[in-house]
Image (cartoon, helix red, strand yellow):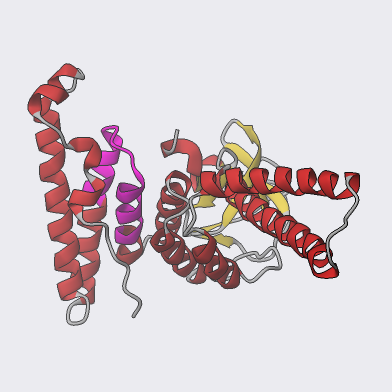
Amino acid sequence: MRILRRVPMLAMLVVLCGSASTVAEAGVDVQDRTDQLATLRKAEASYDLGIELLETRPEEARAAFAVAAADFASVIDQGVRNAGLHYNLGNALLRSGDRGGAILELLRASALDPADPSIASNLAFARSQVPGRPSTGDDPSIADRLATWWHVVPLRMRAASALALWALFWILLAVRQGRTITAAGRGRNLWPATLGILLVASVVLGTTAAIDLRTQRVSDRAVVVAEEVVLRKGNGDGFEAELVQPLVSGIECRVLEARPGWTRVALDDGRSGWLPEASLRTVADSTG
C-alpha cells in the first residue's frame, strides 16, 4: 500500500510558534495558540494510531484517521492555514475513506505550495482512486513526474530566469545582426549554438512557469464531495441527466455559473452541466 506521509507537526506549525510576547503584540490570544498546538498533537497521535491499526484492524484505523482529520480541520477553521495543514488533512481524509474531501484539501495544499513534490505525488495518487475521472487527454502521472523535476527550481526563479534569458537572446541577436563577423569559422559557429541554447532555455523555463501559474489559479476550481450526484442539463431535479452515469466523489470541475442551490460546472473533458450546490466544494474557500 502506498504510504501517505504527513508533515511533522514542527514543520507545519511555523505560524503558531514564537514567544508569548510576540504573539501578544500581534493581538493573538496565547491560550488559543496553546489549544491549537494541543489539538494538533492529538491529531498526530490519532494519525499514528491509524497507521498502527491499518494492517490488523482496518475499520478502527479508518475511525482513527477520521478523528485526526476532524482535529486538523478544527485548527484550519480557527484561521491557521498553510500547505502542511491542508496536506495532512488531505492524507487523513483519504485514509478515512473521504476521497472527495482528500482531493479538495490536497488541491488547497498545492495552491499554497505548488513546488512541493510530496503534495503533487499524493494528489496524483488520490486522483488515481477516482473511478471514471474525466481526462483532458494527457497522462497526469507523466505530467506529475515531469513537474517534480522542474519544481526543484522555485517558480519565481524560473519566471525571472526565463525573462532574463529571453531578453539576452534578443540582445545578442541584435548584436549578431549589427556587426560584421571577422572571427574564424569556429567563432562564427558559436553564435547559432549560443542563441539556440538561450532560446530553448527561456522557452522551457517560461513554459513550466506558465503551467504552475495556471495550476495555482484556483478561483474557479471545485471538487465533488457527494458520494454520487447526477449532472443535469438545468438547475433543477426535474431536468434531464447530462450523463448516463452519476459523478462520484473526487471528480474535479470548473465553476461556470451559480444560481440559488445550483452550480453550473465544466468537467475536465469539456462536458458541462448543473450540480446541486451542496454536492461540491470550491478549492478557493480555504486558500484566500
User: Measured along the vertical axis of the image, is residue 164 above or below residue 62?
Assistant: above
Image point (59%, 72%), residue name? 142
Quadrant in which the C terminus is drawn:
top left
The reply, left or right, for residue 262 in relation to residue 33 is right
Quarter-of-image position of residue 59: bottom left
Q: Position of residue 63 (x, y in %)?
A: 21, 63
Is residue 126 highlighted in magenta? no
Q: Would residue 40 be found to the left or right of residue 119 on screen?
A: left
Q: Position of residue 205 (x, y in %)?
A: 63, 54
Residue 51 percent across, percent down from the top left: 20, 71
Q: As drawn, is 155 to the left or to the right of 55? A: right
Q: Does the magenta stretch include residue 79?
A: yes
Q: Which residue is drawn at 60% across and 38% down?
A: 262
Query: In the picture, residue 229 is in which quadrant?
Result: bottom right
Check the image and report above or below for 287 versus 230. above
The location of residue 281, given as percent across then percent down, is: 49, 44
Front residue of this view, candidates 125 and 232: 125
Image mark count? 0
The quarter of the picture where the N terminus appears is bottom left
The magenta span reads 70-92
Helix, strand or loop: magenta stretch: helix
